[in-house]
Image (cartoon, rainbow, N blue to C red):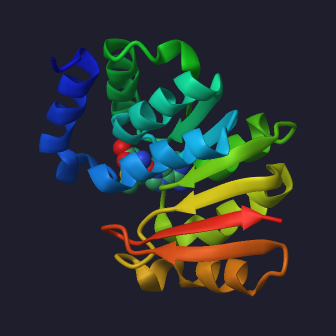
């Protein structure tokens, strides 16, 4: 029987173009990766209406971890809060409103994460990476979406992280191209 969460996710998939949600395949992959990695502290940049957040939080139910997610568009964040409640994952999620760079600097600078999902404004990926590098534990993972769909915009980030000796990097042929980096 289909659970309420599955129904909510299926409904959100019908409007995914409007809310720029990650593909179902990519969401499933991230969910699986968090379970395999046993991630505890996950950070998402770009909540939208909460579609990917629900997938991430469902994996965190197994690992016992927590998701912090950032969105600057208040109406989208309100929808996400509703969707998190509908799916019963609201206690596993801290939703922060504001520009990702400002929120990281002002509210998260003393935190450590072991998994980051980057899915906010593509031209800012390099800036996000520079802010997040000190907050990512060794062995931690960065997953960044839209690597092939927005190749020009994310190029400065891809060039930088791929050239670094302290990251192992692979771009996966998921629908919009997903970069996975492991901090050594
Ligand atoms: C691609 S969508 C995120 C989709 C979401 N991860 C999902 O798959 O359900 C990007 C979201 O990031 C938000 N956003 C873009 N740039 C941002 C920034 N610099 N800070 C915070 N939010 C941002 C947009 O308003 C948009 O809702």
Horizontal and vertical percent position of residue 142: 64, 58
- Is residue 37 something one can see in this rendering? yes
Q: Nearer the viewer, residue 7 or 63?
A: 63
| 27 up-or-down from 49: above or below | below
Q: Residue at x 54, y 49 (%)?
A: 33
In the displayed orientation, state which residue is furthest to the left: 14
- Left or right, 152 with reference to 113: left
Q: Total number of numbered labels?
A: 0
Answer with the quarter of the image where residue 163 lies. Answer: bottom right
Expressed as whole percent of the image width and height from the top left, the position of residue 112 reads 82, 41
Q: Residue at x 44, y 40 (%)?
A: 47
- Can the viewer see residue 46? no
Q: Is residue 65 above or below residue 121?
A: above
* Residue occupying the point 59% across, 45% down: 36
Q: Quadrant of residue 114?
A: top right
Q: Nearer the viewer, residue 19 or 3?
A: 3
Q: Quadrant of the C terminus?
A: bottom right
The spot of residue 50 in percent (x, y) is: 38, 34
| Horizontal and vertical percent position of residue 149 | 34, 76
Q: Is residue 111 above or below residue 147?
A: above
Horizontally, is 87 left or right of 89 in the view? left
Residue depicted at 15% across the width and 17% down the height: 1
């Amino acid at each position: 029987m289909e659970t309420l969460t599955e129904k909510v996710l299926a409904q959100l998939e019908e409007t995914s173009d409007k809310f720029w949600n990650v593909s179902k395949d990519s969401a499933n992959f991230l969910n699986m990766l968090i379970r395999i990695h046993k991630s505890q502290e996950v950070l998402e940049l770009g909540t939208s209406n909460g579609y990917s957040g629900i997938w991430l939080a469902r994996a965190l139910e197994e690992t016992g971890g927590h998701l912090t997610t950032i969105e600057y568009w208040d109406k989208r964040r309100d929808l996400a809060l509703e969707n998190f409640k509908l799916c019963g994952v609201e206690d596993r999620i801290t939703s922060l409103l504001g520009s990702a760079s400002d929120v990281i600097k002002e509210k998260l600078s003393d935190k450590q994460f072991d998994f980051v999902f980057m899915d906010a404004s593509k031209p800012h990926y390099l800036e996000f990476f520079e802010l997040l590098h000190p907050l990512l534990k060794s062995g931690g993972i960065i997953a960044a979406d839209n690597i092939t769909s927005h190749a020009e915009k994310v190029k400065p980030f891809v060039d930088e992280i791929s050239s670094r000796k302290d990251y192992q990097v692979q771009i996966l042929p998921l629908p919009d191209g997903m970069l996975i980096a492991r901090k050594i």
